[in-house]
């Protein structure tokens, strides 16, 4: 499974209903499996982003379908980054000339 980190901003709609954010996060966790994904961690943050979510997905297609579905709900906008643990990074570096 590939790991992704999503940096989340609340939309105007999302901040108006911020009291439901934990409940929405639980619903997102439950829905992830339908897309071949799993939420590893969710953090609400201070600063530039409102949330950080760590996701595992079977592939980029699954991760993208999941992200688009969550975004379509209209409560958040995200920037999703592919993340590499040390073992994967070492495998990548072994291919560098």
Image (spheres, grey):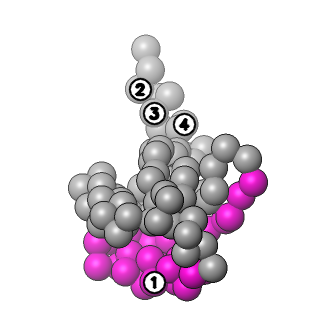
Instruction: Check disc 1 and report the residue beneath it.
Output: 27
Which residue carries the number 3 mark? 92
Q: Residues within 10 Å of mark 4 (few under 14, many from 20)?
A: few
Answer above or below: position of 34 versus 66: below
Residue 22 rendering spot, x and y as whole percentages: 60, 80
Mark 3 residue element: helix
- Give how far apart the Cα atoms at labels 2 and 1 are: 40 Å
Tell me which numbered mark, 2 or 1, is placed earlier along the sequence. 1
Residue at 50% over, 80% down: 24
Residue that appears at 62% across and 59% down: 51
Residue 82 is situated, as x and y percent measured from the top left of the image, at 45, 45
Give the Cα distance between marks 3 and 4. Answer: 5 Å
Question: Mark 3 and mark 2: span between their CA atoms?
Answer: 6 Å
Q: Which residues are magenta?
A: 20-46
Task: Give the quarter of the figure containing the N terminus.
Answer: bottom left
Whether 32 is among the magenta residues is yes
- Asked if the residues shown at circle 3 and circle 2 are in contact, with their CB atoms under 8 angstroms apart, the answer is yes
Image quarter of residue 46:
bottom right
Mark 2 lies on a secondary structure that is loop
Residue designated by label 2: 95
Q: Is residue 1 left or right of residue 46?
A: left
Disc 1: CA contacts within 10 A as few (<14), some (14-19) or many (>=20)? few
Mark 3–mark 4 CB contact (< 8 Å): yes
Report how far apart the C-alphas of labels 2 and 4 lie in the structure.
9 Å
* Relative to 19, 11 lies left or right: left
Q: Could you say which disc has been placed on residue 96 in the image?
A: none
Proximity of marks 2 and 4: CB atoms separated by less than 8 Å: no
Label 1 and label 3: CA atoms lie apart by 35 Å
Instruction: Name the residue tied to disc 4.
Output: 90
């Amino acid at each position: 499974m590939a790991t992704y980190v999503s940096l989340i901003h609340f939309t105007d709609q999302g901040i108006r209903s911020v009291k439901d954010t934990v409940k929405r996060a639980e619903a997102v966790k439950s829905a992830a499996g339908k897309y071949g994904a799993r939420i590893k961690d969710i953090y609400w943050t201070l600063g530039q982003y409102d949330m950080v979510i760590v996701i595992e997905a079977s592939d980029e297609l699954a991760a993208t379908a999941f992200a688009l579905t969550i975004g379509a709900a209209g409560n958040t906008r995200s920037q999703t980054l592919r993340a590499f643990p040390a073992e994967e990074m070492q495998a990548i570096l072994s291919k560098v000339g």
